[in-house]
Image (spheres, rainbow, N blue to C red):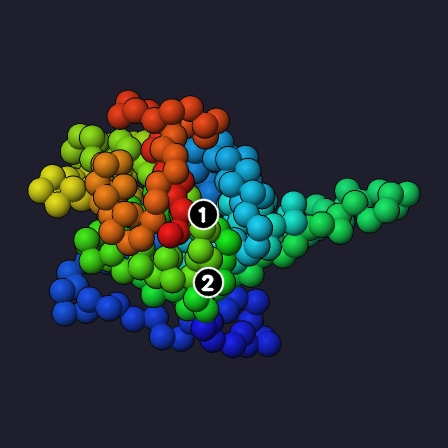
């Protein structure tokens, strides 16, 4: 069961956040995301944009109950879904990411209020506020069978960099899903195909009055199917320059491997899609989407 929410905090904080594999720890998939938080939305607006949000809106709207988003981050998916009335809970380990999710939610509320037509019959009545929980997706802090759907957008399961991390997460998702509940997974297929390089300028642009430059290096551990992105953000404001450095590591499984892992966890795969419009999957697809049901 989720632990009680502090009345002074808008984010529920699962106090028992621990690494269940501390004896094996050399690196964790969640490391780097706190530092990434100020740049996440800026980078994704230039790469992913919002192409996946309508897809997750359709999946979540088809669920007859509460929806959980794994790795909700800055609320990029959670807030738009809740704004159309979906009863949504988002969980993430990163407190800085969740703080930005609350900021996004506040902006959404202001925008909704500014667009209300006083002559209409409360057109914003269906909008909800998502609930944000700080916790570990390997040990979800919720009651059994408390969600009608669980969403894992944009490669969140690829941040689970050890096989036992994925096993624990799938078991935890199976526990909190209702029977016949939907589990939607979005994988990024090209991660293991990246060539190694050093100090390549990937993006330049402006954000909140600062000039940003992303300088990136990539290393591969092909035996373990791990890809590490060494990120260096150079932030320039007038004559002032700051550097922000962090690493993000991802693990990739093929679709057949993920389907097999889902089956072992008690899920039946209903569809494998190759884009956000529902086209069939093949290995050359831009995205790999798996929709499964809990047995």
The quadrant in which the N terminus is found is bottom left
Residue furthest right in the image: 119
Q: Residue at x 50, y 69 (%)?
A: 12
Distance Cα–Cα, label 1 vs label 2: 12 Å
Residue 291 point in image, percent of width and height:
40, 40
Instruction: Establish if 98 lies above or below 14.
Output: above
Mark identifier at residue 96: none
Using residue 199 as the reference point, say whether residue 266 is left or right of it.
Answer: right
Q: Residues within 10 Å of mark 2 (few under 14, many from 20)?
A: some
Q: Is residue 247 left or right of residue 35?
A: left
Q: Position of residue 132 (x, y in %)?
A: 52, 61
Residue found at x 26% / y 68%: 19
Residue carrying label 1: 182
Q: Secondary structure at mark 2?
A: loop
Q: Position of residue 229 (x, y in %)?
A: 24, 42
Name the one closer to the observer, 128 or 96. Answer: 128
- Residue 269 falls in image quadrant: top left
- First in sequence: mark 1 vs mark 2: 2
Q: Residue furthest left?
A: 223
Residue 224 in which image quadrant:
top left
Q: Mark 2 highlights which residue?
A: 145
Residue at (55, 38) in percent of width and height: 58
Residue 214: percent from the left, percent from the top? Answer: 34, 38
SS for callout 1: strand
Q: Is residue 103 visible?
A: no
Seen at 34% across and 65% down, the residue is 139
Give yes or no for contact between labels 1 and 2 (Cβ–Cβ under 8 Å).
Answer: no
Q: Camera-side residue: 126 or 17?
A: 126
Q: Is residue 42 visible?
A: yes
């Amino acid at each position: 069961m989720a632990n009680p929410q502090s009345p002074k905090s808008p984010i529920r904080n699962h106090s028992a956040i621990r690494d269940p594999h501390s004896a094996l720890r050399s690196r964790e998939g969640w490391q780097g995301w706190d530092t990434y938080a100020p740049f996440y939305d800026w980078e994704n607006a230039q790469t992913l944009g919002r192409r996946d949000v309508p897809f997750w809106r359709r999946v979540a709207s088809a669920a007859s109950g509460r929806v959980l988003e794994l790795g909700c981050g800055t609320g990029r998916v959670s807030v738009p879904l809740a704004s159309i009335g979906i009863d949504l809970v988002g969980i993430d380990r990163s407190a800085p990411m969740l703080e930005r999710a609350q900021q996004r939610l506040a902006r959404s509320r202001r925008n909704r209020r500014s667009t209300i037509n006083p002559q209409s019959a409360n057109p914003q009545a269906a909008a909800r506020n998502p609930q944000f929980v700080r916790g570990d997706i390997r040990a979800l802090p919720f009651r059994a069978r408390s969600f009608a759907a669980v969403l894992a957008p944009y490669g969140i399961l690829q941040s689970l960099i050890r096989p036992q991390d994925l096993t624990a997460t799938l078991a935890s998702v199976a526990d909190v899903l209702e029977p016949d509940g939907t589990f939607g997974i979005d994988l990024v297929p090209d991660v293991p195909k990246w060539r190694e390089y050093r100090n390549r300028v990937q993006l330049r642009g402006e954000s909140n009055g600062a000039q940003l430059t992303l300088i990136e290096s990539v290393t591969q551990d092909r035996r373990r199917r791990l890809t590490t992105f060494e990120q260096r953000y150079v932030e320039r404001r007038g004559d002032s320059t700051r550097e922000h450095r962090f690493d993000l590591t991802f693990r990739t499984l093929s679709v057949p491997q993920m389907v097999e892992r889902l089956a072992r966890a008690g899920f039946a795969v209903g569809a494998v899609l190759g884009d956000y419009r529902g086209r069939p999957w093949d290995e050359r697809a831009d995205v790999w989407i798996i929709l499964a049901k809990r047995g």
